[in-house]
């Protein structure tokens, strides 16, 4: 998946990888400011803004994603 890069259009990412985007179960019923994630076949994780699904996506390695999730569980981000 060498064609995958940070900041690439989420729509293009979906076309290149077949990404399936999911929203958190904790997202509110009215949408709001939510993010969606896609777990890519090579172990990377892509993130996009749910209100701008064709906007840019950020792509994280599995260790980066694990560190982020761990940090949120530990309250590191306030």
Image (spheres, rainbow, N blue to C red):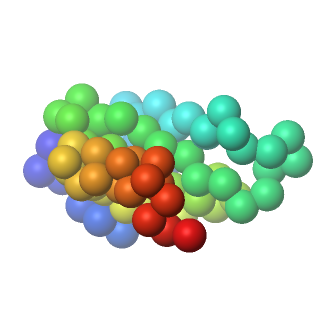
Rendering coords of residue 35 (x, y %): 59, 53
Above or below residue 73? Residue 9 is below
Q: In the displayed structure, does residue 27 sit left or right of residue 4?
A: right
Q: Nearer the viewer, residue 54 or 62?
A: 62
Find the residue positioned furthest to the right. 30
How many marks the image carries: the answer is 0
User: Can residue 65 be spotted in the picture?
Assistant: no
**Left or right: 9, with 23 as reference point:** left
Residue 52 is at least partly visible in this image: yes
Look at 61% across and 39% down and name the residue there: 23
Position above or below: 1 against 22: below
For image coordinates 72% across by 61% down, the residue present is 33
Q: Position of residue 45 (x, y in %)?
A: 33, 44
Front-lying residue, 43 or 14: 43
* Residue depicted at 15% across the width and 43% down the height: 1
Q: Is residue 54 above or below residue 26?
A: below
| Residue 78 % position (x, y) | 56, 70
- Of 67 and 13, the residue lying toward us: 67
């Amino acid at each position: 998946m060498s064609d995958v890069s940070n900041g690439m259009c989420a729509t293009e990412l979906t076309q290149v990888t077949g990404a399936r985007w999911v929203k958190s179960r904790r997202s509110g019923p009215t949408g709001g400011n939510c993010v969606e994630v896609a777990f890519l076949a090579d172990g990377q994780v892509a993130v996009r803004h749910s209100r701008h699904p064709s906007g840019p996506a950020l792509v994280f390695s599995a260790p980066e994603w694990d560190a982020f999730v761990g940090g949120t569980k530990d309250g590191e981000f306030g």
